[in-house]
Image (spheres, rainbow, N blue to C red):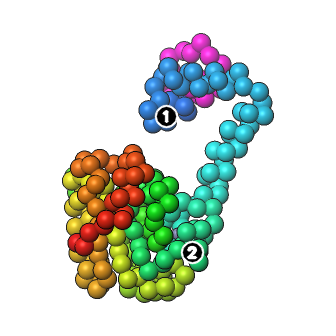
């Protein structure tokens, strides 16, 4: 016999919706119920738009095969753009960091998203990141955006312990390949996160980047 579930006062599909909302980050049971009731009360068109947006994101969005940015076209618009300097690659941990840096409007190079950071305690080693794709881009212009040779790699990891050690390892690897290696200036508060830094601080960090 299947284990007995606590009976719910809600119809089955409402319970399911509450459970799905409850799985979202930062959403507790009460918030999940509030969201579910919002959907119940909204008109059918609005609810369908929400559902369709979730479906479209999962069906259409993938990672750029060059830089690992999230994109609905491969290569992504940044890697494709004639207006970007593809010889300069800013390495970040997550797509969210790329978005924050991009919003400053200060950076004209391209990016490489590592898809994480080194965290030996959590079992995240270099193999779990996209470091080997970065190595390939730097070693072979054909693997970089628009086939242009990489001359400078800027380290844009978060200024905390894991970010620092990730930056050191990526920097050492890049230096071995003979490219110029710089890192974002320390205007970023130690222990802070790129994702939440103000535009001014990020713009400054790009402008005043330092040789590693
Ligand atoms: Zn790209």
**Of pointers 2 and 1, the one earlier in the residue sequence:** 1
Does residue 195 appear to the left or right of 14 in the view shown? left
User: Disc 2 versus disc 1: distance between alpha carbons?
Assistant: 41 Å
Residue at horizontal 29 percent and vertical 53 percent from the top: 188
Q: Is residue 5 rendered magenta in the image?
A: yes
Residue at horizontal 50 percent and vertical 20 percent from the top: 30
In the figure, 53 relative to 98: above or below?
above
Question: Magenta region, mostly helix, strand or loop?
Answer: loop
Task: Tell me whether the residue at label 2 lies in contact with that at label 1, contact meaning CB atoms closer than 8 angstroms.
Answer: no
Q: Could you classify mark 2 by the number of other residues whose Cα lies within 10 Å: few (under 14), some (14-19), or many (20 or more)?
A: few
Residue at horizontal 41 percent and vertical 73 percent from the top: 89
Whether residue 27 is visible to the viewer of this picture, yes or no, is: yes
Does residue 20 appear to the left or right of 119 in the view shown? right
Q: Position of residue 2 (x, y in %)?
A: 51, 26
- Picture quadrant of residue 73: bottom right
Q: Which residues are magenta?
A: 1-18
Say which residue label 2 marks: 83
Q: Position of residue 172 (x, y in %)?
A: 23, 75
Say which residue label 1 marks: 23
Whether residue 93 is visible to the viewer of this picture, yes or no, is: no
Q: Is residue 24 rendered magenta in the image?
A: no
């Amino acid at each position: 016999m299947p284990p007995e579930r606590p009976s719910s006062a809600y119809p089955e599909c409402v319970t399911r919706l509450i459970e799905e909302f409850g799985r979202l980050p930062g959403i507790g049971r009460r918030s999940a119920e509030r969201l579910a009731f919002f959907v119940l009360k909204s008109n059918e068109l609005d609810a369908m738009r929400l559902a369709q947006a979730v479906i479209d994101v999962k069906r259409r969005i993938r990672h750029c095969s060059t830089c690992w940015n999230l994109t609905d076209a491969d290569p992504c618009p940044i890697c494709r753009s004639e207006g970007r300097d593809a010889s300069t690659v800013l390495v970040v941990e997550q797509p969210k960091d790329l978005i924050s840096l991009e919003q400053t409007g200060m950076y004209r190079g391209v990016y490489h998203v590592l898809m994480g950071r080194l965290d030996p305690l959590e079992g995240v080693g270099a193999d779990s990141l996209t470091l080997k794709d970065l190595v390939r881009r730097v070693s072979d212009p054909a693997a970089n955006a628009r086939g242009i040779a990489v001359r400078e790699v800027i380290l844009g990891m978060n200024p905390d312990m894991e970010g620092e050690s990730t930056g050191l390892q990526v920097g050492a690897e890049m230096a071995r390949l003979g490219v110029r290696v710089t890192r974002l200036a320390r205007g970023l508060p130690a222990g802070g996160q790129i994702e939440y830094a103000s535009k001014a601080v990020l713009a400054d960090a790009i402008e005043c980047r330092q040789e590693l």
